[in-house]
Image (cartoon, rainbow, N blue to C red):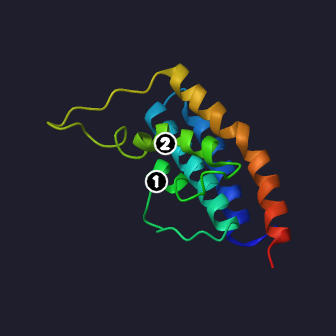
Amino acid sequence: MSGPVASYIALAKEDLAVATKLMPDHPRHAAFNIEQAAEKLLKAVLTAEGIHFPTSHHQLGALAALLPNSHVWRADLMAFDDFTSYATALRYPKPGGGMPADPEDAELKQGWSEVSALVDEIEDWCRDRMAKRP
């Protein structure tokens, strides 16, 4: 597999590796990388299906909703919407200038586990899907 789908998968794996390294000392940044990995897996599936999406769109639930209701990955990818807030809420000051709270360690590990559990399966599915496309 090559092209954008393979690149999305490779970048998702890199984001997960970075999240692993950042979790102990920089949990907000780890959360952002978890969100980025989830987003890239979503975009890999959408690309493999030939579904166009705005490149500036980062709402994970809205991206997953572009898949048909019966799609094999739709429910799993809809669950990634829980990570949408990791893209912004944890990376910018709160209204009034306060620092956002660090995400809970258990929450980060759960998010990392949920995303990383699907990487290889989605990669295999994308490879098969791309091989079947005309």
Q: Position of residue 13 (x, y in %)?
A: 69, 49
Q: Residue furthest left?
A: 96
Residue 85 placement: quadrant: top left
Residue 116 placement: quadrant: top right
**Above or below, comparing residue 43 to residue 78 in the picture:** below
The residue at the point 55 percent across, 26 percent down is: 24
Q: Which residue is mark 2?
A: 81
Q: Position of residue 111 (x, y in %)?
A: 57, 32
The residue at the point 14 percent across, 36 percent down is: 96
The residue at the point 18 percent across, 38 percent down is: 95
Q: Position of residue 83 (x, y in %)?
A: 48, 39
Please state, as top left, top right, bottom left or bottom right, where the C terminus lies in the image.
Answer: bottom right
Residue type pointed to by label 2:
Asp
**Above or below, comparing residue 1 to residue 62 in the picture:** below
- SS class, disc 2: helix
Please state, as top left, top right, bottom left or bottom right, where the N terminus lies in the image.
Answer: bottom right
Few, some or many C-alpha atoms within 10 Å of disc 1 (few <14, some 14-19, many ≥20)?
few
Q: Residue furthest front?
A: 70
Q: Position of residue 121 (x, y in %)?
A: 78, 46
In the picture, measured across the screen, residue 18 lies left or right of residue 55, that is: right
Q: Nearer the viewer, residue 78 or 21?
A: 78
Q: Nearer the viewer, residue 29 or 68?
A: 68
The answer to whether marks 2 and 1 mark residues whose Cβ atoms lie closer than 8 Å is no
The residue at the point 65 percent across, 56 percent down is: 11
- Residue 62 shows which numbered tag? 1
Q: Nearer the viewer, residue 61 or 30?
A: 61
